[in-house]
Image (cartoon, helix red, strand yellow):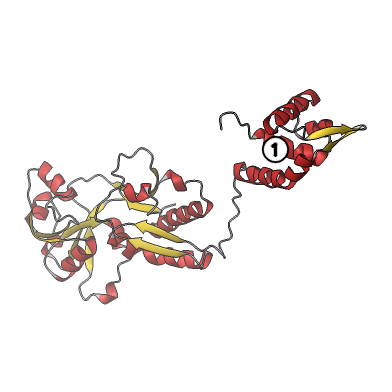
Amino acid sequence: MNDIDLNLLIALDVLLEEGSVTAAAKRLNLSASAMSRTLKRLREATGDPLLVRAGRGLVPTPHASSLRDRVHELARESRSILRPRPHDLDLSTLERTFTLRTNASFVERFSVPLVNTIAEAAPRVCLRFVPKPTKAIEPLREGQLDLEIGVVETTAPELLTRGLFQDRFVGVAGQGHPLLDDAITPQRLAACRHVMASPSGEFTGPMEQALSALSLDREFGVIVPGFSDALRIARHTDRVTLVPHSCLMPVRRHEDPKPLVMFELPAPIDPFTISALWHPRLGADPAHRWFRELVISTCRAAYGET
């Protein structure tokens, strides 16, 4: 199609509507001479005179008359396709499933406010949480996911991100644990028995790195997949654990006979940002824009950030 100029389609539609080179030129913001040259190109492209003089005006040839409706519809569709899409979004009738990939702790702490907010604003929207056994970016690239929630650890340059809130690791022990009786030092913390959350099952993590920097080691004994599991064990045993601060809000203490006690860590660990990630293929989609802004604002409000 290198020799086809689709602008001719628009010009032909206007010429057939106006029946006048001068009037068509005015509508298209062209000079009369430029419009005449366009009509000449149309005649060469179609092999038909298209518009011929009759008195002081122009009348369509039979071939032009047969093309009128088709040309008008094609021109209308072309304008519609190439015009910026409208951003009006009727949430009351929106029917769509949004898929978030995140860990179980995020679901436990933020799913209720998200579900309630979405149900109130867009009752026909379905929210689907899926686990992330890996952090592969292919599901985002292929459109299988709407959002990824977590710490940004990808080098994929095309992914877009927005921070939800800043989190930090804190220590947790059951009420009455001996560690809480005195000042918590790296040595006393390292001497405790620990339960560690590790989705991969590896004996590594932020606290290990911090204590190792102080030439201290700690005893694990128990490795569990998620932070909720680690908190449950810490609540009912003499184990202590490290979890993101966001995992502790809200804690439904009335369900547990032994409340948890949070303490700040004696060894410095840098805070980290929980973010939403999405692929630019969805960046301009009005429904997705509404959804991701809702997730961001809801999570920030639930965590106490603005």
Q: Nearer the viewer, residue 295 or 262?
A: 295
Q: Is residue 297 left or right of residue 236?
A: right
Decide: is 137 above or below 48: below
Q: Is residue 101 left or right of residue 94?
A: left
Q: Nearer the viewer, residue 117 or 188?
A: 117
Residue 281 at x, y percent in the picture? 45, 45
Q: Is residue 188 left or right of residue 227?
A: left
Residue at 15% across / 54% down in the picture? Answer: 184
Residue at 43% across / 53% down in the picture? Answer: 296
Residue at the far top in the pictured view:
33
Q: What amino acid does circle 1 point to?
A: Ile
Helix, strand or loop at mark 1: helix
Q: Nearer the viewer, residue 304 or 113?
A: 113
Decide: is 109 above or below 16: below
Residue 120 at x, y percent in the picture? 51, 67
Residue at 73% across / 37% down in the picture? Answer: 12
**Could you classify mark 1 by the number of other residues whose Cα lies within 10 Å: few (under 14), some (14-19), or many (20 or more)?**
some
Q: Nearer the viewer, residue 138 or 63?
A: 63
Residue hosting label 1? 10
Residue 5 at x, y percent in the picture? 63, 31
Q: Is residue 286 visible?
A: yes
The picture quadrant where one finds residue 57 is top right
Residue 169 at x, y percent in the picture? 24, 52
Q: Is residue 166 visible?
A: no
